[in-house]
Image (cartoon, helix red, strand yellow):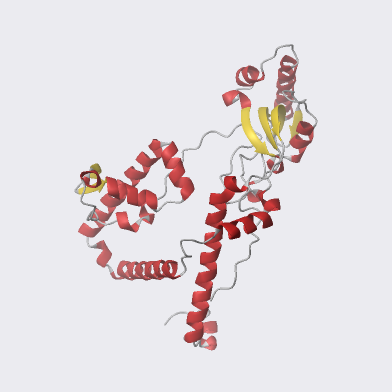
């Protein structure tokens, strides 16, 4: 039986993370989308939907069986001899993580991109099967490995699924109480920025021109009634008026944070010289640090607790299986396996 799950989660699990202001990429959490730098608000990236090849159920040249209803049989996309029905699309979306599903609901264009990838995937599959490419010995071996791994993974998921009623209210409350510090949302700053780039190695004349430009912009900003967004767009060519949005305190460069901390609301900093150029920051507003309530984080907390319980159950199952069937290894042969060429 699996051991009792710890109720103390990793600190970074549930802390919301906003866009990043010029932290090195290596310092950013890989669980969240890295974003803006001190060069100004990051342009909206073209978000690619999940790869179609990751969805085996939709890779078949024969459309899967659907429920006996007109809605289920509705063909919403077609390529060649292959159709995608409403149920096919729902099945695809159901395989995605919660965040991706939410993104698809917010932006229908993303779903359109995903469907196009699925259709392209089916075209490739039809061509490969028509050429009997899957019957080549090396391909057949690779497909068998994929099938075996899929069976193992799906079976392990089935034997390690927590009970539907886990976790209970008492366990959720206990975990929430134990993780209050980890759940703390740091102070946030709503910022706008004007940036004049001065890359390393810039010749002295260009660096002097950049300094004059930032000085001229600063002079305009000091005039009564100056419009920061308008000046950012017209004089610095910054998109969206230089608005960066809400940024958590830990994700702001220390040199900029030091200046921001001393600004009153709606005030503008003096030019800040960093290794990438000149920055002028406007502090629009500030949010104090706070701990979200249990209802606010309950869904994410439950998801994390179920994932931890499933991992523990999986490890316990594998340990018990190996205990019942102890493996025997030829360590000498293994040690020579990668040092000697295959015969």
**Front-most of 156 and 252?**
156
> 87 left or right of 202?
left
> 75 left or right of 15?
left
For the C terminus, which image quadrant?
A: bottom left
Res. 110 image quadrant: top left
**Front-most of 324 and 132?**
324
Residue for point 23% across, 59% down: 129
Res. 253 image quadrant: top right
The vertical placement of 156 against 57, above or below, is: below
The vertical placement of 112 against 9, above or below, is: above
How many marks on residues? Answer: 0
User: Could you say where residue 269 lies in the image, as x and y percent from the top left?
Assistant: 76, 26
> 36 left or right of 108?
right
Residue for point 51% across, 61% down: 166
The residue sitting at the right extreme is: 262
User: Could you say where residue 74 lies in the image, as x and y percent from the top left?
Assistant: 22, 43
User: Could you say where residue 52 lies in the image, as x and y percent from the top left?
Assistant: 36, 51
The vertical placement of 135 against 100, above or below, is: below
The vertical placement of 201 against 162, above or below, is: above
The residue sitting at the front extreme is: 170
User: Could you say where residue 153 lies in the image, as x and y percent from the top left?
Assistant: 42, 67
Answer yes or no: is residue 342 visible.
Answer: yes
């Amino acid at each position: 039986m699996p051991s009792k799950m710890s109720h103390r989660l990793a600190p970074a699990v549930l802390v919301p993370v906003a866009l990043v202001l010029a932290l090195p990429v290596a310092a950013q959490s890989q669980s969240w989308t890295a974003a803006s730098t001190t060069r100004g608000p990051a342009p909206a990236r073209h978000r690619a939907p999940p790869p179609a090849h990751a969805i085996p159920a939709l890779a078949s040249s024969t459309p899967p069986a659907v429920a006996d209803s007109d809605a289920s049989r509705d063909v919403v996309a077609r390529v060649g001899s292959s159709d995608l029905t409403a149920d096919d699309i729902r099945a695809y979306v159901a395989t995605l993580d919660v965040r991706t599903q939410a993104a698809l609901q917010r932006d229908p264009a993303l779903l359109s991109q995903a469907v196009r990838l699925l259709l392209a995937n089916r075209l490739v599959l039809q061509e490969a099967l028509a050429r009997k490419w899957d019957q080549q010995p090396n391909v057949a071996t690779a497909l068998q490995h994929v099938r075996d791994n899929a069976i193992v993974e799906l079976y392990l998921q089935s034997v390690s699924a927590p009970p539907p009623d886990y976790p209970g209210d008492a366990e959720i409350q206990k975990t929430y109480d134990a993780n209050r510090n980890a759940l703390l949302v740091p102070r946030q700053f709503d910022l706008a920025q004007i940036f004049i780039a001065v890359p390393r190695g810039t010749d002295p004349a260009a660096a002097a021109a950049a300094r004059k430009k930032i000085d001229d912009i600063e002079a305009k900003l000091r005039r009564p009634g100056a419009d920061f967004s308008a000046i950012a767009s017209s004089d610095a060519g910054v998109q969206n008026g230089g608005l960066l949005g809400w940024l958590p305190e830990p994700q702001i460069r220390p040199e900029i944070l030091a200046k921001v901390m001393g600004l009153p609301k709606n005030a503008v900093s003096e030019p800040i010289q960093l290794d990438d150029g000149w920055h002028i920051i406007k502090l629009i507003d500030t949010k104090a640090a706070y701990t979200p309530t249990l209802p606010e984080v309950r869904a994410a907390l439950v998801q994390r607790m179920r994932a931890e319980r499933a991992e523990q159950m999986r490890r316990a199952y594998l340990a018990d299986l190996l205990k019942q069937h102890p493996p025997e290894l030829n360590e000498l042969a293994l040690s020579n396996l990668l040092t000697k060429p295959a015969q």
